Amino acid sequence: MNSADAAFEARDALYEEDLPGLGKLRLLRLAPDGDADLVHGWVKEERARFWGMNGMGRDEVRDIYLFLDSLDTHHGYLMTVAGQPAGIFQTYEPRQDPVADAYPARAEDTGMHLLLAPATQPVPNFTTTLLSGLVRFLLSDPAKDRVVAEPDARNNKAIARFTGFGFEAGPKVQLAGKEAQLVFLSREKFESRPAG
């Protein structure tokens, strides 16, 4: 384990789960200053263009996450899997987000954004297994019964991942800066998915 990996392991996790075949998923509160170089390195890549931060400098990205960190309704996490940084996971209360202007958000909804880190070596079923853990985390709140995501409508890969996992496509809606494809996953549908 190198010193960077050890530093991730030393941080307190808000959620941990052993993912079959992948290792331990840990959700760490994203540290806007401490994680800025890592996060900026991910979001500036062409593959992350739908994340909306391509042309931003490191300090602009840090400032966005400083603002996010100041909110009670929106949260940013650095995901690690088996001790390695795996991406950014953001959660939000749809009724306290601009997306509420685009669909009838309910108190029982919980929203998510997901950006995977670049894979150094592709792992079969990585995204599906990771999504299972993230949805379990979101639905660990008994007051929530539906997960909402809003990938860019041009991001066919992300939409296919969500719908392949079991999310149902809702309407396309116009949000600030993008046309989004809303996708929804109910607790009932998630819990009835086949194991594995």
Image: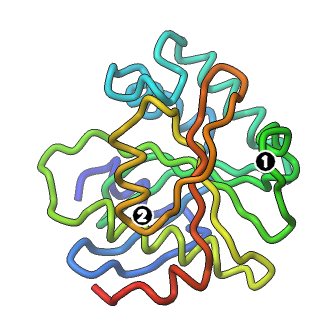
| Quadrant occupied by the N terminus | bottom left
Report the number of discs: 2
Secondary structure beneath label 1: loop
Point out the tag, 2 or 1, that comes first from the N-terminus.
2
Residue toward you, 171 or 61: 171
Query: Mark 2 belongs to which amino acid?
Result: Glu
Residue 180: where, in percent of width, then height? 59, 35
Who's the residue at 64% across and 77% down the image? Answer: 139
Mark pair 2, 1: CA separation: 39 Å
Q: Which label sits in the foreground, 2 or 1?
A: 1
Circle 1: residue type: Tyr
Res 189 label? none
- The picture quadrant where one finds residue 111 is bottom right
Q: Which mark is residue 103?
A: 1
Horizontal side of 89 relative to 146 (left or right) equals: left
Quadrant in which the C terminus appears: bottom left
| Residue sitting farthest toward the front | 171
Residue 171 is situated, as x and y percent measured from the top left of the image, at 63, 45
Q: Which residue is label 2 attached to?
A: 9
Q: Is residue 176 above or below residue 38?
A: above
Q: Tell me if mark 1 has few (under 14), some (14-19) or many (20+) residues whose alpha carbon lies within 10 angstroms of its own.
A: some
Residue at 53 percent of width and 81 percent of height: 189
Tag 2's secondary structure?
helix
Residue 77 visible in image: no
Position in image of residue 92 (x %, y %)? 73, 53
